[in-house]
Amino acid sequence: MSLASKSLVSILASLAMTSPALAGLTPTEGNVAQKKCGASRAESLTAMGTLVRGSTSLNVANRRLSVGKVLAPGEVVFYANLTESKKVYRAKKQIEVIDSSPMTPDVKITPEMPLPVLGTFTSNSGRRYDVISVGSGYSGFLTLVDDAGFLCSDRLDDKLVAVGMPTVYQHEPLISEAADTGLSKPRTQAVAVTFLGLAGASASFEIAVMVNGTVEARKVSSFDAFSPTVQLGDLAMAIKVDGGGLTVTSLNEPTDYVRWLGELRAGMRR
């Protein structure tokens, strides 16, 4: 469901928070102006990329790794059990949104204000942002957060078109928090990477995605066993063939499990 189909009023009405408009607001010492990331006043953000609604994030409840040992065929190299939660940002220190338009109020964002994530936006250039809600009522708006945790100097209306002439003043990145989904039985997900074995110069791995304990999708991938790195989307493993066996010497797990599992599912058989 597109964010564009939701009115700003209906989104913000469900949020119990306030963000008072302040006359003559000035930047806090140390805060610096942030760049624009979104649409111009002439076109909607939806013309510049892809919007996906959904505020759920995935957090690792527990993990199991087999690193630094010779692997036997059928051995699990990586396993992560994931729990769902809603993603919310908070400011470490006050942030100012100062608007040059006399028709659009200035807003301050304080550490006690939750900034709920409503979805994600991926630009046509490949940059990914979280779409967040700031404030409520006349001073409420939508904007973007980049992957470093900084707000964009964009103020979006219910059609995701830029309004006003805002500049965000921020010094430290936002803090990302996990909030309760509110579901009595939240869905659990897991992902497992299993070493299947060596065949000549080829190393094979199976990756499986499970939902509530049932395998939803799986895929087998083969790689050059003498390549230094195996890349399974955002999961990277450094490998080494030693005495006829294979060892994973290091492993870098994904930073965004929602995106990673989405990409895996798109290329998997069910």
Image: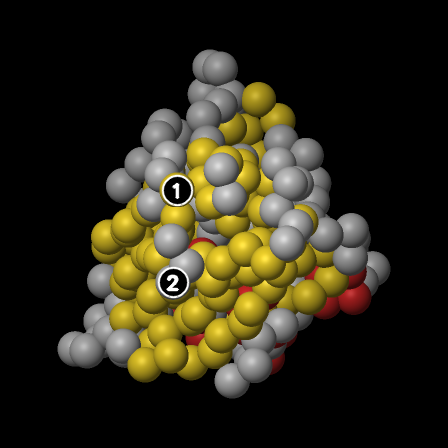
Disc 2 secondary structure class: loop
Question: 128 left or right of 189?
Answer: right
**Proximity of marks 1 and 2: CB atoms separated by less than 8 Å:** no
Residue at the image point whose x is 56% and y is 68% from the top: 220
Residue 167 can be seen, yes or no? no
Mark 1 neighbour density, 10 Å: few (under 14) some (14–19) many (20 or more): some
Q: Which residue does the image show at 49% across and 74% down from the upper left?
A: 218
Q: Residue at x 23, y 62 (%)?
A: 180
Mark 2 surroundings: few (<14), some (14-19) or many (≥20) residues within 10 A: few
Residue 29, position as x, y percentages in the image: 46, 14
Q: Which residue is mark 1?
A: 70
Q: Is residue 54 above or below residue 112?
A: below
**Circle 1 SS class:** strand
Quarter occupied by the N terminus: bottom right
Amino acid under disc 2: Gly
The residue carrying mark 2 is 74
Q: Residue furthest bottom?
A: 270
Q: Which mark is residue 92?
A: none
The answer to whether one can see residue 171 in this image is yes
* Amino acid type of the residue tagged 1 in the rendering: Val
